[in-house]
Image (cartoon, rainbow, N blue to C red):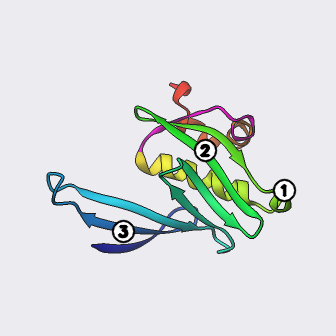
Amino acid sequence: MAFQLVLNAHLQITLVISIRNRSNCGFDTLFQIMTMNPSNQYIVTRNENDFRFEVVTKDGTAYIDYRWSGEILLLLYIFVPVSFRGKGISRVLLEHVLNYALEKKVKIKVFCPYIAKYIRMHPEHQGLLANNE
């Protein structure tokens, strides 16, 4: 088992654990545990059981629901607790998910109007859209 802290281009810090999986033809398995935004205010985790990227707050969990369709990451819905809206959680979540797609070299398909608007307002992410080809 190996631990690694990664600082990406957006100054997000990610803790990655690599485990050698000997029962599965010797392939390495990577688990991304958490990402912290630059101000270290919010921690993003990927909840693979519930298909969510999450930020836990004192008033509940902010999240982006996702699913997979082959090699395409489907972004279904974003939710932020009312008392935490307007404090940058949605931006942190979205940047994390979009960086995840970029790092994994997968395309995305967006079903949430809020996420679609965010991507329209940030053209640097439009290349990730599956329908852009």
Q: Is residue 54 visible?
A: yes
Q: Which residues are magenta?
A: 105-115
Percent of width and height locating residue 52 = 57, 50
Q: Quadrant of the N terminus?
A: bottom left
Q: Quadrant of residue 27?
A: bottom left
Question: What is the secondary structure assignment of the residue under circle 1?
Answer: helix
Magenta residue check for 112? yes
| CB-based contact (under 8 Å), mark 3 and mark 1 | no
Rounded to the nearest angstrom, the CA distance separating label 2 from label 3 is 23 Å
Relative to 125, 112 lies left or right:
right
Which residue occupies 52% across, 56% down? 47
Earlier along the polypeptide chain: callout 2 or callout 3?
3
Q: Are marks 1 and 2 in contact (CB under 8 Å)?
A: no
Say which amino acid is labelled 3. Ile
Label 3 sits on residue: 17
Name the front one of labels 3 and 1.
1
**Closest to the observer, 87 or 126:** 87
Residue 37: percent from left, percent from top = 63, 67
Give the residue pinned by disc 2. 65
User: Is disc 2 surrounded by few (<14), some (14 to 19) or many (20+) residues within 10 Å?
Assistant: some
User: Which residue corresponds to mark 1?
Assistant: 82
Between the residue at mark 3 and the residue at mark 1, the CA separation in whole angstroms equals 33 Å
Give the image location of residue 80, x and y in percent: 75, 54
Secondary structure under tag 2 reads: strand
Magenta stretch containing residue 51, yes or no?
no
Whether residue 12 appears in this view of the structure is: no
Label 3: state its secondary structure: strand
Q: In this picture, is 4 found above or below 22?
A: below
Q: Is residue 127 left or right of residue 122?
A: left
Q: Amino acid at mark 2?
A: Asp
**Image coords of residue 109 (percent x, y):** 56, 32
